[in-house]
């Protein structure tokens, strides 16, 4: 998996309440979540398809709401690059097929920069430099490659 | 041999489990509520599985938006009831029974040594009973519905020891907030916490639930109190089956925290749960609404503590009391606690999550501030542009009396 896209940059401890506030959760229309992505912290967040989020540590902390990675996915975000992720968000992102990468590129990029992520070799190219990113265990990469846990399960039947 | 997490995950995986390993483990009980079940059921149906793995091991409490706040919610709840009926899931606890984590305990599902997974981040609450309990999202829950199993990375464990008596005005909530201040919001990410020390032993089961409930606010996967006589007493006549007491054996811990219980009441200020201060530092800040309730602090002892301060007084700001369950509410009604709170001017709402997650029933306007006994003070959580302070039921009650943040020790 390789991605190239424009950066939206946020800090540490971006919680699920700001990724998608509680009042938008009660619907089974998963695409609607994309319209409210990052509503709690950045009303100007209007990514073009393929854009990426770069953040600090503990991205996605807080609630177990799967609407958070779904919101980013349906808003058009191709990949989230953060120093670290909260564990429920980490699981949820893989399960819904939103690529996430742990890499310390935060200080090397500005909002609007274009960066490249290569999940296969575990590398992020940002600000003219190459950063090592952690690679997922094989079975998780397979789930992500399939597009999420539902698709992965179906492919195994 | 190992930490409580290694012992329980090893038993559930049928092999020795050491920190850092990935295991596939059999889940003893799975909980999803009216909020997370919507997407979990959707994913389950998309997986193409007809029947859930074991309807007796799935528990569905309705608590997040109860009673339904609009037609969309009502329709989603109707569909969930119909699905549960079709799947023969009899452990469905409908509107008014209480908050999922409280109901799980009251109904005896939270037993020592069990692996319990909930589609709610505060599912770590059940660690209060010596279970390994953790939160997951909807699709992971769908996988459990389908197979009864889930993958886990066996966590490293941080040992937290709290010693000393809990002084007047200092509660399990204050100890909890102080621990979070020390560990920080991501200090235990992907790890488990085990709690030891005389202060933990002194805590009631309600207090231990408060403590373990907020383990997630340090990023932890689980927070566990080793079971003791109090655990067994609580489970008498409630436990859903046999259970064994599981303890750490020759465990290796990745980190060690030691705290004294000799502290002031603690308040977490906006907008991070680790932004914790002694109450003396924040006293006097204006508050528009007080909220006493939630899976963190909506139990009988919390309401009774609030009543202790509010007896014979009048609140100076909007004060919402939301009992964690019907059983809690009934006890408060029967013994006069509810009457004291109402006479003081509080509003008692039906059991449920209330405005904790900004859903309904007491959300705030921009610029307003709430002193709340809940668990999160994230930006905009209880209403866009509103501030949330977290404290104990005692601090919340004292604050209600003054309309500004107040030290409860002056009222005891």
Image: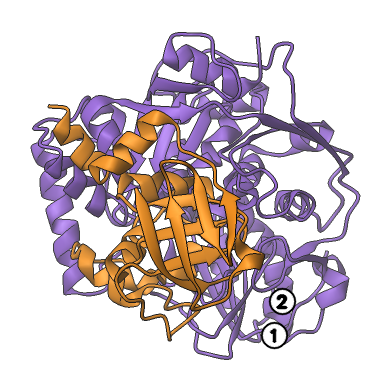
Chain colours: A orange, B purple
Which of the 4 image quadrants contains residue B255?
top right
Q: Nearer the viewer, residue B141 or B291?
A: B141
Evaluate whether residue B352 shows in this view. Answer: no
Give me the chain letter of mark 1.
B
Residue B338, percent from left and from top: 53, 64
Residue A39, percent from left and from top: 42, 78
Which of the 4 image quadrants contains residue B247?
top right
How packed mark 1 is, by other alpha carbons closer than 10 Å (few <14, some 14-19, many 20 or more), is many
* Residue lying at 54% horizontally and 86% vertically, measured from the top left: B385
Residue B124, percent from left and from top: 53, 40
**Residue beneath disc 2:** B399
Evaluate whether residue B145 shows in this view. Answer: yes
How packed mark 2 is, by other alpha carbons closer than 10 Å (few <14, some 14-19, many 20 or more), is many
Q: Which quadrant, please, contains the C terminus of chain A?
A: top left
* Residue lying at 88% horizontally and 54% vertically, measured from the top left: B263
| Residue B169 vertical placement versus B205 (above, below) | below
For numbered disc 2, what is the local secondary structure? helix
Q: Nearer the viewer, residue B339 or A21?
A: A21
* Residue lying at 8% horizontally and 39% vertically, measured from the top left: B86
* Residue lying at 60% horizontally and 35% vertically, measured from the top left: B128
Which of the 4 image quadrants contains residue B361?
bottom left
Give me the chain letter of mark 2.
B
Residue B166 appears left or right of B222: right
Q: Nearer the viewer, residue B242 or B338?
A: B242
Q: Nearer the viewer, residue B106 or A105?
A: A105
Q: CA separation, marks 1 and 2?
A: 6 Å
Residue B50 appears left or right of A118: left
Circles 1, 2 touching at the beta carbon (< 8 Å): yes
User: For the image shown, how many numbered marks are present on the structure?
Assistant: 2
| Residue B199 vertical placement versus B378 (above, below) | above
**Residue beneath disc 1:** B403
Residue B373, percent from left and from top: 62, 63
């Amino acid at each position: 998996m390789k991605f190239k896209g424009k950066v939206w940059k946020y800090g540490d401890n971006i919680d699920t309440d700001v990724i998608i506030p509680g009042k938008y959760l009660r619907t089974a229309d998963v695409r609607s979540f994309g319209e409210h992505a990052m509503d709690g912290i950045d009303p100007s967040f209007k990514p073009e398809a393929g854009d990426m989020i770069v953040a600090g540590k503990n991205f996605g902390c807080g609630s177990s709401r799967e609407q958070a990675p779904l919101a980013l996915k349906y808003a058009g975000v191709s990949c989230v690059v953060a120093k670290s992720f909260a564990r429920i968000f980490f699981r949820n992102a893989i399960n819904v097929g939103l690529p996430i990468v742990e890499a310390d590129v935060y200080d090397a990029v500005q909002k609007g920069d274009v960066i490249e992520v290569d999940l296969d070799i575990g590398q992020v190219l940002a600000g003219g430099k190459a950063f090592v990113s952690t690679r997922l265990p094989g079975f998780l990469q397979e789930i992500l490659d399939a597009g999420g846990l539902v698709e992965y399960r179906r492919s195994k039947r | 041999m190992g930490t409580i997490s290694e012992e329980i995950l090893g038993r559930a995986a049928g092999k020795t489990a050491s920190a850092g390993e990935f295991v596939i483990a059999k889940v003893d009980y799975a909980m999803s509520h009216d909020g997370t079940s919507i997407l979990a059921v959707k994913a389950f149906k998309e997986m193409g599985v007809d029947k859930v793995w074991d309807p007796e091991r799935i528990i569905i409490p309705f608590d997040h938006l109860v009673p339904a706040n609009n037609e969309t919610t009502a329709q989603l709840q109707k569909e969930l009831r119909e699905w549960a009926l079709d799947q023969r899931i009899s452990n469905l606890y409908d509107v008014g029974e209480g908050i999922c984590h409280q109901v799980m305990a009251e109904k005896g599902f939270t037993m020592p040594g069990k692996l319990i997974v909930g589609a709610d981040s505060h599912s770590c609450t059940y660690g209060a009973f010596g279970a390994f309990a953790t939160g997951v999202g909807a699709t992971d829950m769908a996988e459990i519905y389908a197979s009864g199993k889930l993958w886990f990375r066996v966590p490293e464990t941080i040992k937290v020891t709290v010693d000393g008596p809990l002084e007047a005005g200092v509660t399990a909530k204050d100890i909890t907030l102080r621990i979070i201040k020390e560990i920080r919001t991501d200090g235990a990410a992907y790890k488990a916490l085990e709690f030891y020390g005389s202060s933990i032993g002194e805590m009631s089961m309600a207090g231990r639930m408060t403590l373990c409930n907020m383990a997630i606010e340090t990023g932890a996967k689980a927070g566990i109190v080793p079971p003791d006589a109090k655990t067994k007493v609580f489970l008498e006549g409630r436990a859903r089956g046999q259970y064994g007491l599981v303890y750490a054996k020759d465990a290796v811990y990745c980190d060690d925290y030691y705290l004294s219980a000799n502290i002031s009441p603690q308040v977490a200020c906006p907008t991070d749960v680790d932004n914790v201060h002694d109450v003396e530092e924040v006293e006097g800040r204006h508050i528009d609404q007080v909220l006493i309730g939630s899976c963190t602090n909506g139990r009988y002892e919390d309401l009774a503590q609030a009543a202790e301060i509010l007896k014979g007084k009048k609140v100076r700001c909007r004060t919402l009391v939301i009992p964690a369950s019907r059983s809690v509410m009934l006890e408060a009604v029967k013994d006069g606690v509810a009457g004291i709170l109402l006479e003081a001017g509080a509003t008692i709402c039906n059991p449920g999550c209330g405005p904790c997650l900004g859903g309904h029933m007491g959300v705030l306007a921009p610029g307003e501030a709430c002193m709340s006994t809940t668990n999160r003070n994230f930006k905009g959580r209880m209403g866009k542009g509103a501030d949330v302070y977290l404290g104990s039921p005692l601090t919340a009650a004292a604050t209600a009396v003054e309309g500004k943040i107040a030290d409860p020790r002056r009222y005891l």
